[in-house]
Amino acid sequence: MKKVGFVSLGCPKNLVDSEVMMGQLKNAGYEITANETDADVLVVNTCGFIESAKQESVEAILDATRQKGQGKAKRVVVAGCLVERYRDDLMKELPEVDAFIGTNQINDILKAANEEFDAREFSLSPIGNKSATYLYDFDTPRFRATESHTAFIKIAEGCDRPCTFCSIPGMRGSFRSRRFGSILKEAEDLAKQGVKEIVLIAQDSSRYGEDLGEVDALAKLIRALGEVKNLEWIRVMYAYPTHISDVFLEAINETPKAVKYLDMPLQHASRNVLKLMKRGGNRESLERLINKVRSKVPNITIRTTFITGFPGETEEDFEELMTFVRNCEFDNVGVFTYSDEEGTLAFDLPNKVDAKTTKQRRARLMKEQARISKRKNRSKIGNVYKVIFEGLSQESDLLFQGRLEGQAQEIDGYILINDMPENFEPRVGEIYNIKINEAYEYDLIGEII
């Protein structure tokens, strides 16, 4: 039995692709190994979104080819977004890689891993291809790499948004939704496997079903998933602000299993910068949206992301963003420095912001958000919350950890658990009542009661 090792980089959407490829290989008789030095085949599923991600992907590819030269591996396969953006350059510069497969070629992984197949001859669709059709289905083999109690479900692929900073449409193709029944069946199957939390993902989750002629399809999906037996939590990631409808918010509020959490990347608040990003809106309209979300779903946790140093961002624009963050007091915020990516519309924009200013602005925004997060977390001290238990803490073997509804795995903070009833043995994936005793900028400390 041949062994295959995987390195999956980038976002959860990419991780699902890796899980599907691993599932197909496992069904074909391969053994999935976490020990890369023991693998006969090494697969690197790359990210090509921004410069830091591209650099990480290249380093992972070079590491895999070194292992091939020094160890047991006989074959290296490179997959994913970086292949879509730079396949010609990669094939030229990395002859030691045996196969390159794009995001629309997940089903070719068996050929790519086969030593007898000359996979360098794969025909790839043109860069910026809009005819991509690949979507996995409920019965597609899948080998999950997440914790046993949580799983991602990709509800759509691709994107049609014109955001000037983003290269995703060119790598993933046009927006296309999976069928309602396929998603529901996958969720039911995952629940039977012991999954307690499902996370719905897409490049633009809020548009789910639109291309199928459906109206408010995401809201209907949330309500239907709320009826799936043994599921406990349903989380939605990557919702676009212009598609946050009242019907969608009502579905979250009225579905007990839907966590009161909204991940909504806003990117900026200045009218000038949003216009340059081709996203539209302004600080006042976005503040009205945040107020509506909070009025429709009381106690909801809102997470967002911002970009500093976008071409044309003035000091006045940045100060408006700071004011917006102070006014809205988001629960969780991620801040990225602008990455100038060839092939995007922003690449050709004038008035670039220098790297030093871009980083300083990010640091100032993160400092402001840390102050907000610490105050909001301290307000939780003494209160009791439902928490999904995840076992030993990543920080210390002396602590356990879990997550509130308002904490998405690996991107938000954790609850660190330092006490529980005597002789109590908590089980991973179960939901317990936890009292918060201490609070910091991102993490909380509490006890199971």
Image: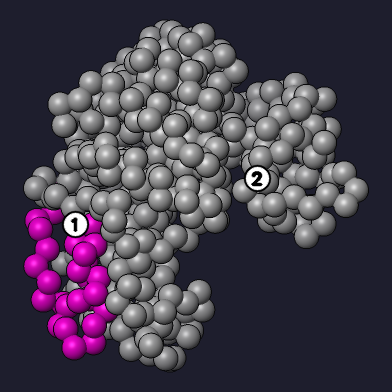
261, above or below 228, in the image: above
Q: Residue 255: where, in percent of width, then height? A: 48, 23
On the rendered image, what quadrant is the C terminus found in? top right
The earlier-in-sequence mark between 1 and 2 is 1
Residues 9 and 336: in front is 9
| Residue name at image x 51 percent, y 8 percent | 295
Pointer 1 local density, CA inside 10 Å: few below 14, some 14–19, many at least 20: many
Q: Residue 383: where, in percent of width, then height? A: 78, 24
Q: Quadrant of residue 441?
A: top right
Q: Judge whether residue 103 is colored magenta.
A: yes
On the rendered image, what quadrant is the N terminus found in? bottom left
Mark 1 vs mark 2, CA separation in Å: 37 Å
Q: Which residue is mark 1?
A: 104
- Disc 1 versus disc 2: nearer the observer: 2
Residue kind at label 2, given as amino acid type: Glu
Regarding mark 1 in the picture, which secondary structure is present there?
Answer: loop
Q: Quadrant of residue 345?
A: top left
Pointer 2 local density, CA inside 10 Å: few below 14, some 14–19, many at least 20: some
Q: Is residue 334 left or right of residue 59?
A: right
Residue kind at label 1, given as amino acid type: Asn
Q: Judge whether residue 4 is colored magenta.
A: no
275, above or below 335, in the image: above
Regarding mark 2 in the picture, which secondary structure is present there?
Answer: loop
| Residue 101 appears in view | yes
Residue stretch in magenta: 100-128
Residues 293 and 230: in front is 230
